[in-house]
Amino acid sequence: MFDVTFMLLIPVFIFALWAQYRVKSTYAKYLRVPAARGLTGQEAARRLLDAGGLSSVGIERIAGELTDHYDPRKRVLRLSDANFDGRSVAALGVACHEAGHALQHARGYVPLQIRQAIWPVAGFGSTLAMPLFFIGFLFHFPVLMDVGILVYAVAAVFTLVTLPVEFDASHRAVQLLTTHGIVSTEERGQVSAVLNAAALTYVAAALMAVTQLIRLLLLRGRR
């Protein structure tokens, strides 16, 4: 039979596709705009880290496109080639956004601590919650459905906690780039455009997770 609850996911899925398009197109646009100071993403991130007393945090190169991230376990920034060597406005924004995460980690930013604490369960939930739930749904095992919902709820909370973490890292990046004179007033707006577009993907992920959780609760109600 057709699952009516699946209809809930369609508008969120469309929004997620639009968010992916927006971040890629905005990033590609400003990747072609050279920054006036001529610093690479790696150099700009290094300046912000050193200014924040984080000279011990390393910066490494990583393969791929927009694979940039901060590893709190090893205390290292990993920047993709275009952002490590790039001297564009986009490279500065992405690289310094990751530096913002390192600063959050060093300052004990609470949402980041919560996200790190629930990550093991959230990682498990994002992989196994749905199979557990639908096995329970198909074979009439309510307990298995409840376990699936509970674990998936943790994964949904993870996506919600990620929102303030990402927005704050972007805010820190823009503020510090301006304070240290790495970008001009005009470039500040361009950096913000790149980071705001990137934030849409996290908003889409949170909406998808919450909507999926509501869908599971509705299906559970049928049993």
Image (spheres, rainbow, N blue to C red):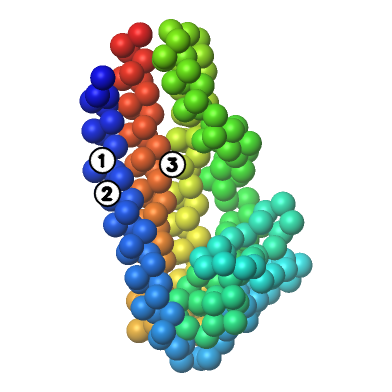
Tell me whether circle 3 and circle 2 mark residues in contact (CB < 8 Å). Answer: no
Please state the horizontal and vertical placement of residue 56, each as a whole percent of the image.
76, 67
Of the residues under marks 3 and 2, which one precedes in the sequence?
2
Which residue shows up at 35% across the image and 84% down it? 186
Circle 2 residue:
14
Circle 1 residue:
10
97 left or right of 4 in image: right
Mark 2–mark 1 distance (CA, rounded to whole Å): 6 Å
Mark 3–mark 2 distance (CA, rounded to whole Å): 19 Å
Q: Quadrant of residue 212?
A: top left
Question: In front here: 190 or 175?
Answer: 190
Which residue shows up at 62% across the image and 59% down it? 70
219 left or right of 146 in image: left
**Rendered position, 146 above or below 202:** above
Which residue shows up at 54% across the image and 82% down it? 86
**Rendered position, 39 above or below 59:** below
* Residue type marked 2: Ile
Question: In front here: 169 or 212?
Answer: 212
Tell me whether circle 2 and circle 1 mark residues in contact (CB < 8 Å). Answer: yes
Please state the horizontal and vertical placement of residue 93, each as a whole percent of the image.
48, 73
